[in-house]
Amino acid sequence: MIRVLIVCSWGMSTSLLVDSMMTAARVKQQDLIVEALSAGEYMERVEDFDIILIAPQIRHLRKNIEAIASSLHKPVAMIEPFHYATMNGEAVLEQIEHIFHVTKGE
Amino acid sequence: MIERVGNWFERYLVPPLGAIGSSIYLQAIRDAFIIFTLPLIIAGSVFLIIANPPFWSPDAIPESYKAFQTAVEVPFQLSFGLMALFLAFGVAHSLSQYRRTEAVQPGILAIVVFLVVSIPVGDLDTLRLGDLLPYFGGQGLLVAILVGIGTGEVVYRFRQSRLTIRLPKTVPPNVKRAFEALVPTLILLTVAWLLEWFISAHTFINADGKAQPYTLPILLMTVFKPLVVVQDSYPAAVLEIILMMLLWSVGIHGMNIVTAMAAPFWFTTLANNVHGGHGIVTEPFFHIFAHLGGSGATWPLVIYMLRSRSSQLRTVGKVALGPAIFNINEPITFGVPMVLNPIMMIPFVCVPLVIVTINYIVFSLGWVHVPVIMQPFTVPVGISGIIASGGDIRGGLLQLFDILVSAVLYYPFFKAWERILMGKEQQAAQTNEGPKEQLVAAHHQSN
């Protein structure tokens, strides 16, 4: 199972991406949990996830988020703006699987 | 050429704007507004609508309704009307979360400090709640933010410095936490009380012609009143919309950041409007009347994209339609993209500026009732304008007119960008690769 946290601005537009990711995961029969939290709420929940993704509209917070995540040894990645824009859950899922296997391999 | 301009923006525009966006104080204020006070403001507004039904003009309300009206205003006053109290909690709470320390205790302490500085030191039996109530709402926001940040900082410093009551390791963590909070609580409480004692020893003559003791919020509002007036002006509105759109142009949530800075003024003005004021520059002025279909007034772009001959724009258009109805436009911002796009950035900043100008004129001429009702920004265009102006149909018509203006102004820029994309798509098709993959790849490079 892969547990993914998406940090975004309000959690509004990201919820659309989450739906699309869940659909993609069902098709691939990948066991996936995705939660979208705003930049004000995510800190206390980082521990509960395997991978932290950052939505493009808060990329200026990347350093802060990386600092928090790395203290808990969680990998962090940016969502590609175009994938985010087109709500391409499939592409984001691939990104997640890639990160998951790389970090597991270490 | 386009890449080079993009790189220039990335180098010189992103760092300063990003620095504003990552200030933890601004983030804490923004989160406090969004998470802690917005639900109260919106729920309270529902009661406000019931108290002042839009189908009656204020002078035409029947006598029989007036007793009921007074009753309905109670839940409004105790939610919307107390937003500063909860904002104080929210700011201290969010700030502590950003500092990664326990957050509820500083939040509660901020409420206590806010109460102490808002109520005159003296005989509590003779106080009239009605005299003080405005300063727990719109008029107290500035103090609430200062108290929230101050309390959060003081508690944090104490926790850092270990200048606190130390207990043996065998004491359970919850008990320990309570004792740890004791020293900063005592100090803050004493300082706030002494300050308020000094301030409330002085009196002023209130609207009823009676002497009333000063409190910290009353004093600050007397000092800052000119600033609230300055903020409710056309130049201030222009400054705010330009900053919002410049932030969005580099992909940072501009509305959020400007909200953190301007919200105390917006809500003071809005609360004044609720009580018959004529302020224009408020939260709905931007969220409801300027950002039609999302920040940048991008509604018309959705229609253009659905009919575009560029496959990238058509793809984005299909995804963008649903969210646009609810004023969410991240698909457009990152998919067209507007962000760091030297062509689309021009209308992305200028169209909202033109709309703000038109709306400012319309509101100051009294052609549409000024914003009084706060609602979620996701309410569809047309309906939201009517609600925001307290049931004025012309509020909805103004939004539709603004969309027409946006459609006309965006068109030439959209066409220019479409031509560039189609050129790229044709090139991609000639090199035998799938056009879509190529475009995504090209997009990666430009990032």
Image: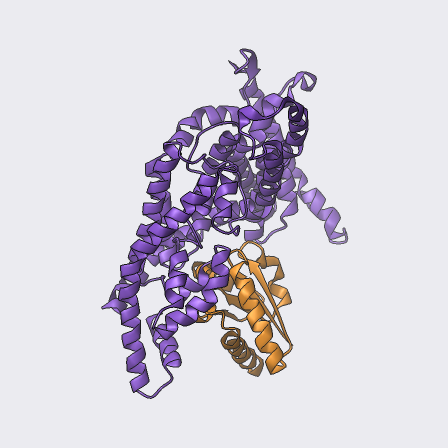
Chain colours: A orange, B purple
Left or right, B389 with reference to B408: right
Give the total of numbered labels.
0
Is residue B226 visible in this depiction of the protein?
Answer: yes
- Residue B374: x %, y % from top left: 53, 41
With respect to residue B141, does B330 lie above or below? below
Query: Hey, which residue is sitting farthest bottom in the picture?
Result: B432
Is residue B283 visible in this depiction of the protein?
Answer: no
With respect to residue B104, does A18 lie above or below? below
> Where, quadrant-wise, is the N terminus of chain A in this rendering?
bottom right
- Residue B20: x %, y % from top left: 40, 50
Instruction: Identify which residue is drawn at 30% across, 74% down.
Output: B422
Left or right, B94 with reference to B104: left
B196 vs A19, nearest the viewer: A19
- Residue A84: x %, y % from top left: 47, 68
> Where, quadrant-wise, is the C terminus of chain A in this rendering?
bottom right
With respect to residue B81, does B22 lie above or below? below
A20 vs A71, nearest the viewer: A20
